[in-house]
Image (cartoon, helix red, strand yellow):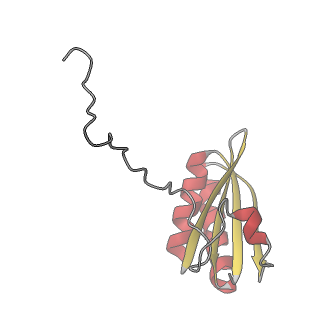
C-alpha cells in the first residue's frame, strides 16, 4: 500500500460519482466504501501517491457537482496497521481485500437418499 485516498460524501450518488471519476482520472484501485450512517459514505482508493492525489482531487470535484463533499484526504505511505481498520477481513497474500463484494454462497444439498418434496405435491 503506497497511499490511501478518502472522499467522504453525503449520499450514495455523490459517492458513486466520486469513485467513478477517481478511477477514471488516474491509475488507482478501489479498496471499497464505508457507510457511517446518516447518509455518510466514504470512498477509499489506493495506489501511487501522485496518482491517488490526482484521483482524489478529480473525484471530490465531480462529487461536489452532484452532491455534498464533506472531506477529502490523502495519506502517503500509511502504517500497515491501518489495514486492520480499513478492511473488514484480514487481507491475503494479494494485499487489501476489495470492498463491496460478498462471497458467493453455495446451495446446501439434501443428504443422499433423503429428498424433500415441496408442499402440495
Residue drawn at point x = 64 percent, y = 75 percent: 46
Spot the residue most to the front: 113
Spot the residue most to the top: 120
Q: Position of residue 16 (x, y in %)?
A: 55, 55
Residue drawn at point x = 37 percent, y = 44 percent: 108
Spot the residue most to the left: 121
Residue 72 in sight from this viewpoint: no
Q: Position of residue 101 (x, y in %)?
A: 50, 57
Residue drawn at point x = 63 percent, y = 70 percent: 45
- 73 shown above or below 117: below
Q: Nearer the viewer, residue 86 or 28?
A: 86
Q: Nearer the viewer, residue 108 or 78?
A: 108
Q: Quadrant of the C terminus?
A: top left
- 56 shown above or below 118: below
Q: Quadrant of the N terminus?
A: bottom right
Residue 84 in sight from this viewpoint: yes
* Image quadrant assignment for residue 29: bottom right
Q: Position of residue 83 (x, y in %)?
A: 73, 70
29 lies left or right of 73: left
Residue drawn at point x = 67 percent, y = 63 percent: 87
78 lies left or right of 35: right
- How many numbered badges does the structure rendering display? 0
Q: Position of residue 2 (x, y in %)?
A: 69, 84
* Image quadrant assignment for residue 4: bottom right
- 40 shown above or below 79: above
- 83 shown above or below 50: above
Q: Nearer the viewer, residue 9 or 68?
A: 9
Amino acid at each position: 500500500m503506497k497511499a490511501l485516498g478518502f472522499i467522504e460524501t453525503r449520499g450514495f450518488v455523490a459517492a458513486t460519482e466520486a469513485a467513478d471519476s477517481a478511477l477514471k482520472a488516474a491509475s488507482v484501485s478501489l479498496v471499497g466504501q464505508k457507510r457511517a450512517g446518516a447518509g455518510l459514505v466514504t470512498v477509499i482508493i489506493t495506489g501511487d501517491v501522485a496518482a491517488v492525489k490526482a484521483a482524489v482531487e478529480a473525484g471530490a470535484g465531480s462529487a461536489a457537482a452532484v452532491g455534498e463533499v464533506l472531506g477529502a484526504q490523502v495519506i502517503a505511505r500509511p502504517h500497515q496497521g491501518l489495514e486492520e481498520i480499513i478492511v473488514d477481513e484480514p487481507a491475503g497474500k494479494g494485499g487489501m481485500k476489495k470492498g463491496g463484494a460478498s462471497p458467493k454462497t453455495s446451495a446446501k444439498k439434501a443428504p443422499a437418499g433423503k429428498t424433500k418434496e415441496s408442499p402440495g405435491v
